[in-house]
Image (tube, rainbow, N blue to C red):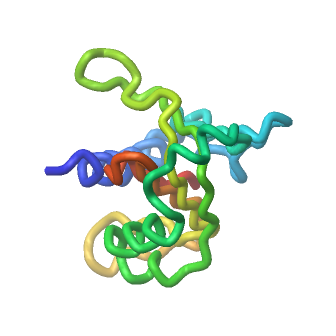
């Protein structure tokens, strides 16, 4: 299983768990600081959109390529939705195999689909929810590696 597929499975499993435990969902929209930082604190993800010229110049993946990769890696419903695409410096607090955060200060394309439908869990015919979530998908702008995906409701 690729790292991105694992992250998507983890994100899906994580989404169901807080509601089942009565934990309030992550506040929406994500917090944006004066420094153009976007943060999803309960997920542990954040990115900085104010980039230096050197950081912008080091991207080897274009926005068009990032959108094509996003469309190829998500379901057709998400692929058709309006989205925000931004080049940013991405970090997360998810611990990797060495016990350190997986991604720290990685130049990445961050694709956000606001108001995406929440995943439906349960047996066939389970009632759908009207809850809308931010779906976030992240691609390394230098290596073209899918980094992570999560949904914040």
**Residue 13 in view, yes or no:** no
Residue plotted at (50% across, 72% down):
64
Question: Image check: 19 left or right of 6?
Answer: right
Residue plotted at (51% across, 41% down):
107
Question: Image check: 89 left or right of 19?
Answer: right
With respect to residue 4, does 42 lie above or below? above
On-image quarter of the C terminus: bottom right
Percent coordinates x, y for residue 79 in the rendering? 45, 78
With respect to residue 122, does 40 lie above or below? above
Question: Image check: 83 left or right of 108?
Answer: right
Percent coordinates x, y for residue 66 in the rendering? 45, 64
In the depicted view, which residue is nearer to us: 68 or 79? 68
Residue plotted at (57% across, 67% down):
113
**Residue 27 in view, yes or no:** yes
Question: Image check: 117 left or right of 120?
Answer: right
Outermost residue, right side: 34
Residue 103, quarter of the rendered image: top left
């Amino acid at each position: 299983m690729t790292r991105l597929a694992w992250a998507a499975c983890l994100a899906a499993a994580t989404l169901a768990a807080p509601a089942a435990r009565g934990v309030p969902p992550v506040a929406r929209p994500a917090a944006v600081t004066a420094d153009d930082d976007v943060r999803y604190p309960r997920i542990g993800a954040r990115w900085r959109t104010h980039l230096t010229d050197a950081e912008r110049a080091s991207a080897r993946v274009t926005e068009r390529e990032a959108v094509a990769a996003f469309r190829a890696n998500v379901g057709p419903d998400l692929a058709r939705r309006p989205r925000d695409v931004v080049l940013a410096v991405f970090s997360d607090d998810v611990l990797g195999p060495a016990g350190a955060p997986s991604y720290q200060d990685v130049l990445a394309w961050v694709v956000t689909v606001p108001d995406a439908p929440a995943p439906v869990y349960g047996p066939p015919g389970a009632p759908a929810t009207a809850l809308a979530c931010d779906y976030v998908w992240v691609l390394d702008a230098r290596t073209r590696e899918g980094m992570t995906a999560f949904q914040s409701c």
